[in-house]
Amino acid sequence: MKKLSGLLFVGCIALTGCEGSTDGDLTPTPPTPDPTPPALAADVCYLMKTTKGDITLAIDLTNMPITGKNFKQYVDKSFYNGTLFHRTVNNFMIQGGGFTTGLKSKPGDAPIKNEAAVGISNERGTISMARTDDPNSATSQFFINVLDNPHLDASASNYGYAVFGKVVDGMDVADQISIVPTKSSGGFANTPVQEILINSVAKTSCPAA
């Protein structure tokens, strides 16, 4: 069994077959992040209905074409309906999109290229792709930052985690999810004691700027 660090966002500690895990080759050095990153675009918005309330997400397809399209494709085929926010860490982030009730893994599609070098920061309210220690291993899992987490950004020594959108309504719901009681069992850590379901994710109108 391969022990994985909690900061790798795979949703498990020592569990084989984790979503998004891969043993692909690593590039020798991380790509240089853009020193003047673009502002996040709101190309398409989605209403995420959860058992804790609703969250509206604006997704950037312009600056993050691979990552944004990846999320859109999962939404278009209703992949996220019935999945969990399976990992919640107070003053850090909430993670979901890879497991169904009972912590049953829901396999995603082929991994995508890491676009974190675009340089958009993991600020409070942004949504990013989860992955393993392979920088190009992200599939369906994502996380919402509940605080500014610049240590997750791409740098000269860090591949980073790719930000591809932001919460435009319902950040209070994300905050509430981040503080629920959690437990560790069966190789999983920071798992809500009471399951938090993503009931549905569907396209909606983007709020006026």
Image (cartoon, grey):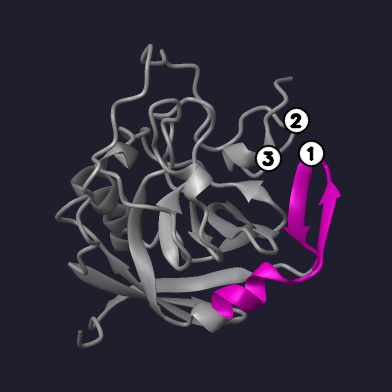
Distance from disc 1 to disc 3, alpha carbons, whole Å, reads 11 Å
> Which residue in the protein does label 1 denote?
187
Residue under label 2, please give it: 14
Amino acid at circle 3: Gly
Counting from the top left corner in percent of width and height, residue 102 is at 72, 56
Residue 61: percent from left, percent from top: 19, 56
Residue kind at label 2, given as amino acid type: Ala
Q: Residue at x 56, y 80 (%)?
A: 173
Say if mark 1 contacts mark 3, CB within 8 Å.
no
Report if residue 177 lies within the magenta region: yes
Residue 190 sits inside the magenta stretch = yes
Q: Nearer the viewer, mark 2 or mark 3?
A: 3
Label 2 element class: loop
The residue that disc 3 covers is 6
Where disc 1 sits, the SS reads: loop
Q: For the residues marked 2 and 3, what is the alpha-carbon distance in whole angstroms?
A: 10 Å
Q: Residue at x 75, y 71 (%)?
A: 180
Q: Are marks 2 and 1 in contact (CB under 8 Å)?
A: yes
